[in-house]
Amino acid sequence: MKIGFIGLGNMGRPMAENLADAGHEVQAFDVAGVGSDKLEEAGSAADAARGAEVVVTMLPSGAILRDVAAEIIPAMDEGAVLLDCSTVDVESARAVAEDAKAAGLLALDAPVSGGTGGARAGTLTFMVGGDADGFAKAKPLFDVMGQKAVHCGGSGNGQAAKICNNMILGITMIGTCEAFALADKLGLDRQAMFDVVSTSSGYSWSMNVYCPAPGIGPDSPADHDYQPGFAAELMLKDLRLAQQAAEAADADTPLGLAARDLYADFVEREDGASKDFSAMLPRFETRGR
Ligand code: NAD
């Protein structure tokens, strides 16, 4: 396929390179330069989009996505797919999809989980909102860039799935970290705590797969001085998007709100910036009630 790819950052570049390695022709654009000999560099976002069957965007925010979409939608061929893989607010995803559909395009919001490791290995999970025919057209690309693509319904539902998942993740990580810190103070050995909880009703991905305690459970960022992994800043971004959506939808999410405020303190007022989101454990460890 002829593919346009816009936003070649930590995630976008390996995703685009995997598409090129699979034999697709990729025209790429990034304001900071493309920096890959596997990709053909376009002079602008519109140039990257022109003539492409699918245009993938992998951008930092909803505001930037809206700007880029306004530039590329008029340049795209009728029937082409605008496939946004960025994590953005539900409202921006739906607004961009509406503009794309009005111009005769197919539109998908398809945020990912799996991080930069998953982007490089081609093992991302895509959560996809949009029409079934757009999903079918993009499916071969999901198969190259990821291991799983779940069609979640209409436009914006991919973003909705992503922020609901990450709201659960933020809350369970905080719960796991505060429970370890409490266990320490009660004199309970961390390995014993892991052995019990990982096989009891308190188990979760945060405990079992990504344990925040160094030396316990499978290898995780805790075993590498909390180098991300999934950076606390990115968790904060997703928790903010969840609260923005909850406010717009009038949903009561008290723990999501508390998780957002804790990660905001950690990243913006303490020393959490640039650490993995599981570094909440050393934070709780050093605090008293
Ligand atoms: P990044 O900051 O590394 O990359 C974003 C890229 O977009 C940059 O290279 C930037 O120059 C480019 N860009 C900005 N404005 C542009 C414009 N107007 N036109 C063209 N290019 C422009 O971010 P990332 O880590 O690659 O993340 C991309 C998206 O994926 C974000 O929405 C993020 O929330 C999401 N995400 C990231 C991860 C992760 O682990 N990094 C995991 C899941 C989802």
Image (cartoon, helix red, strand yellow):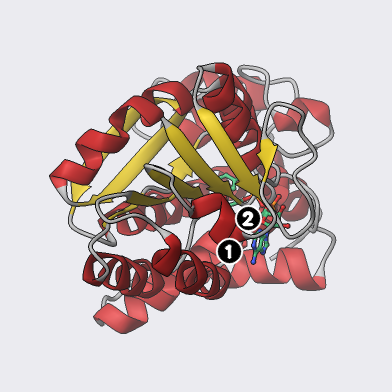
Determine crowd level at label 1: few under 14, some 14-19, many 20+ residues with C-alpha closer than 10 A.
some
Estimate the x, y position of residue 62 in percent, counting from the top left. 50, 70
Q: Nearer the viewer, residue 195 or 66?
A: 66
Disc 1 on helix, strand or loop?
Answer: helix
* Quarter of the image where the N terminus is located: top left
Q: Nearer the viewer, residue 26 or 210?
A: 26
Q: Nearer the viewer, residue 218 or 30?
A: 30
Estimate the x, y position of residue 234 in percent, counting from the top left. 63, 55
Give the labeled residue for mark 1.
Answer: 237
Image quadrant in which you'd find residue 53: top left
Is the residue at mark 1 in contact range of ligand 1, meaning its CB lies under 8 Å from it? Answer: yes
Q: Residue at x 69, y 35 (%)?
A: 187
Q: Which mark is residue 234?
A: 2
Disc 2 on helix, strand or loop?
Answer: helix
Q: Residue at x 18, y 57 (%)?
A: 154
Above or below for 104 versus 30 = below
Say whether residue 138 is left or right of residue 62. left
Gap between marks 1 and 2 measured at Cα: 5 Å
Determine crowd level at label 2: few under 14, some 14-19, many 20+ residues with C-alpha closer than 10 A.
some
Circles 1, 2 touching at the beta carbon (< 8 Å): yes
Is the residue at mark 2 in contact range of ligand 1, meaning its CB lies under 8 Å from it? Answer: yes
Estimate the x, y position of residue 93 in percent, counting from the top left. 37, 66
The three-letter code of the residue at mark 2 reads Leu
* Quarter of the image where the C terminus is located: bottom right
Say whether residue 166 is left or right of residue 270. left
Estimate the x, y position of residue 19 in percent, counting from the top left. 52, 26
Inspect this view and state whether residue 186 appears. no
Q: Which mark is residue 276?
A: none
Say whether residue 286 is left or right of residue 20. right
Q: Residue at x 66, y 49 (%)?
A: 42
